[in-house]
Amino acid sequence: MSQDTLALLIDGDNASPKIFTGLLAEIANYGTASVRRIYGDWTKPSLNGWKASLLEHSIQPIQQFAYTTGKNATDGAMIIDAMDLLYTGRFSGFCIVSSDSDFARLAARIREQGVTVYGFGERKTPRPFITACDKFVYFDVLGEQVDEAPVGSAPERGVAAVRAGKKAPTPQKAEPEKAAAPSAYTKGRLDEAALQMLEKAVAASADDDGRAHLGRVGAHLAKQAPDFDARNYGFARLSDLAEASGILDVERVGDHPKVVTVKLKPRRK
């Protein structure tokens, strides 16, 4: 288990308490959040829903009154605190929970210091903030929603359709994307762009024999696109996505731990 020390900073105006249990479970994969703060104007009724989660998970609410109408003072307070924490040198990573593009420069500045940035937000999150993070996770893949598209159903049919030159079918249970801000990926599909990205990552990570460790492939994918996540396509793990892609030969060796390697299949003429 990772022993990295993390700082968790939540923009209360741009997050919902419904994702909190899944959020903490996801963060546990990266380290321990020793600092847990959430920012907002707690005099507003819209933030009342956070109370139970804050008490249960020992989250410190930071009060920030709005100085004037139409301006978000919460962002400023969160950025100032983040920089103060960064300069202590105690943290190997920051978890920024928001869908606001105002945090793009903050994420970039933290990365310049050699500290990892994990972003969490909605599908409508602007690309500048997403790409400023080392890894970005969408809210809808956290918690129970991970299993919305079972492995071996819609995603596999979508892959087969793409490779056959046909339009991938739309999953029956998938909710429509918001037209105002479409995401880079479509839930329940592994489109041609994703297949090409996967192919390039394997080629770049492969040894002389053409076989690559799946962990290295995943790291390369994260560098190409911080929000590339197998769960965006309905798969629980990257190994499941690799098997369903149709372009990789997947091999598992050993049990504890099990080593997964992949190799590109020969192209069909």
Image (spheres, rainbow, N blue to C red):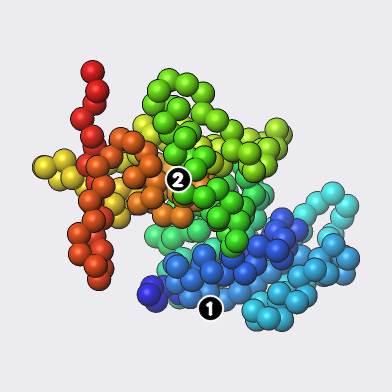
Q: Which mark is residue 148?
A: none
The structure residue drawn at horizontal position 49% and vertical position 71%, both measured from the top left corner, is: 28
Question: Disc 1 designates what residue?
Answer: 34
Residue 168 makes an appearance in the image = yes
* Mark 2, secondary structure of its residue: loop
Residue at 85% x, 62% y is: 46
Q: Is residue 110 left or right of residue 16?
A: left
Q: Is residue 59 above or below residue 129?
A: below
Residue at 59% x, 51% y is: 148
Relative to 30, is 105 on the left or the right?
right
- Residue 234 x, y percent position in the rendering: 51, 47
- The correct choice, above or below, for 46 with respect to 199 in the image is below
Q: Residues within 10 Å of mark 2 (few under 14, many from 20)?
A: some
In the rendered structure, which disc, 2 or 1, sits on the residue that comes first in sequence? Answer: 1
Crowding at mark 1 (Cα within 10 Å: few <14, some 14-19, many 20+): few
Cα distance, mark 2 to mark 1?
Answer: 38 Å
In the rendered view of the protein, which quadrant contains the N terminus?
A: bottom left
Mark 1 element type: strand
